[in-house]
Image (cartoon, rainbow, N blue to C red):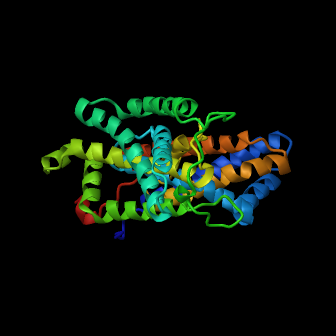
Amino acid sequence: MMTKNQPILPILLPILSPIVAIAFALLVGAILIAFSGNNPVIAYTVLFNESLTNYYGFGSTLTKTAPLLLAGLGVLVALKAGQFNIGAEGQIYMGGLGSTLVGLYLPGLPAWIHLPLALLGGFLFGGIWGSIPGYLKAVRGVNEVITTLLLNYVALNLVGYLVQQPLIEPGAPSPYSPLLPETSWLPIILPQTQAHAGILVGLIAAIVLWVVLARSPLGYQIAAVGMNPTAARYAGMSVKRTIILVMALAGGLAGLAGSSEVLGLRHRLFDQFSPGYGYDAIAIAFLSRGNIAGVVATSLFFGALRSGANVMQRSANVPVTVVYAIQGLTVLFIAISFALERRFKFQGFFKPQMHADERR
């Protein structure tokens, strides 16, 4: 509870800084649009009207939000334990591979069994891929940023090899697997659109993760390890086991993002099927400031940008690259806000003032 003399700025800063970062990114984006000879008001109106108020455009937004949300949760849960999961992109590919294998090699099952098993396969494959850097960090002391980043390329090339050789559809004009049985597909939730139940999987995962982090002993342990691993170790917690577990959980959530793409949208495993969702997830997790509701909102914002970008290019003659510039600028401004916050804290701006009798 806030005391009488406690400054309000440090309380509002985690809420305001992402909003300010997005606002500045949109402002700079408007300047770029104006320099290209186009009207930024018209461009942004087209962008957000198409992606949020148009029925088919909103369906596209939900389709793109689902993997962003799941991968963003995967990055966030690792950050809660003080780990930087840069490997969500590779975990997405492994999750897509796991769901594909279950879908192809367990045919004949009813949908109420086949679909959950396919999702579980994606979660397990992503979790195993995430546990590798977790083990290397916990047991061998290898920096998880390096290992997760490098494993992205391993996963991408592994999936690329599999869909070009053993898993390729006979006679396919490009590398992709056979069509998955319909019993493993995620159902459509908005008729006549591509919006599928992957967004519901993401929202359920967000609720479950919130309960785990806020209301369970495991959540307390993850937070303790993230804040002070030395103190957590003295308190009897297994820091190594927690790191491995949280990285496996992070990988599993990102793996579900791959499952949602394969089971909900493409119904096949394609080479390079992710357009960089795992890297966007890093920005989403940092913009959320550790808040799960913030991950949901930011994922929707990024999904809307991706959904409306092509329409903005066709209707307002604004290149799609402007949207990617806005995403990058958002990350830049949130990083600047982090730096300013640390500087203000160091200078004592966020310290509550003492009462007169306390100073005496």
Viewer-side residue, 19 vs 133: 133
Q: Position of residue 66 (x, y in %)?
A: 55, 55
- Locate the C terminus and report the quarter of the image it occupies: bottom left
Q: Give the residue displayed 36% in from the left and 70% down from the top.
A: 4
How many marks can you see? Answer: 0
The residue depicted at 42 percent of the width and 49 percent of the height is 121
Q: Position of residue 277 (x, y in %)?
A: 56, 44
Judge whether residue 261 can be spotted in this image: yes
> In which quadrant of the rendered view does residue 56 lie?
bottom right
Front-lying residue, 256 or 113 = 113
- Residue 153 image point, x, y percent: 49, 29
Residue ID at (70%, 49%): 27
- Nearer to the camera, 131 or 102: 102
Percent of width and height locating residue 24: 64, 49
Left or right: 13 with respect to 59? left
Q: Does any portion of residue 8 appear in the rendered image?
A: no
Q: Horizontally, is 248 left or right of 264 in the view?
A: left
Q: Is residue 211 left or right of residue 150?
A: left
In the displayed structure, would residue 216 be above or below residue 155?
below
Quarter-of-image position of residue 269: top right
Q: Quadrant of the N terminus?
A: bottom left
